Image (spheres, rainbow, N blue to C red):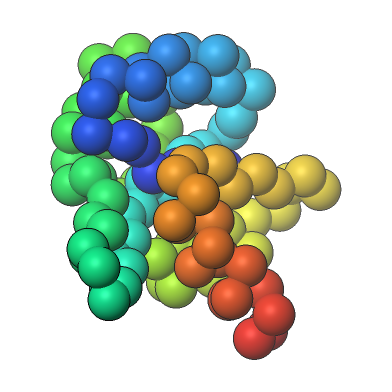
Amino acid sequence: MAFVGARDDRWKHALDVLVDYTSEIIVTTFNQESDEMPKVGMVPGEIAEYLRLRGKACVTEPDLAKAYHRLLERPEPLLLVTGSLYMLDDVCQLIRGS
């Protein structure tokens, strides 16, 4: 699973639900520039620390494209990308490009 969180604590609740269904979590971030206001994801270290305190295997990859390609290399038949809509927009562009 690739994951990026919001700047408030909602991401903790989402991870608490999903963590038992994953074998590894790849924590990443995004950086989307727009005309009005740039959108920037969280620093992956905070999410990774939260996971490690709960005994969950995780990897941090701050480059979203590298995180996505690392996810594609996983052996599981079902892969999940979750996070902000801004990040998912970037992932959709990666999917269309691959």
**Foreground residue among 69 and 86:** 86
Q: Is residue 45 left or right of residue 86?
A: left
Does 34 appear above or below 77?
A: below
Residue 86 appears left or right of 79: left
| Image side of residue 68 versus residue 64, left or right | right
Q: Quarter of the image for the C terminus: give it.
A: bottom right
The image position of residue 58, as x and y in percent, is 38, 38
* Residue at left offset 65%, top offset 44%: 80
Q: How many marks?
A: 0
Is residue 14 visible in the rendered image? The answer is yes
- Viewer-proximal residue, 58 or 41? 41
Q: Is residue 55 visible?
A: no
Tell which residue pokes out farthest to the front in this image.
36
Quadrant in which residue 78 is drawn: top right
Instruction: Find residue 76 and report its horizontal and vertical position in percent.
Output: 74, 46
**Residue 71 falls in image quadrant:** bottom right
Q: Nearer the viewer, residue 47 or 9?
A: 9
Q: Residue at x 58, y 33 (%)?
A: 23
Q: In percent of the image, x 23 and y 34: which residue is there? A: 7
* Residue 52 lies in quadrant: top left
Instruction: Report the quarter where the N terminus lies.
Output: top right
**Above or below — where is 94 with respect to 37?**
below
> Could you tell me residue 88's position as x and y percent?
54, 56
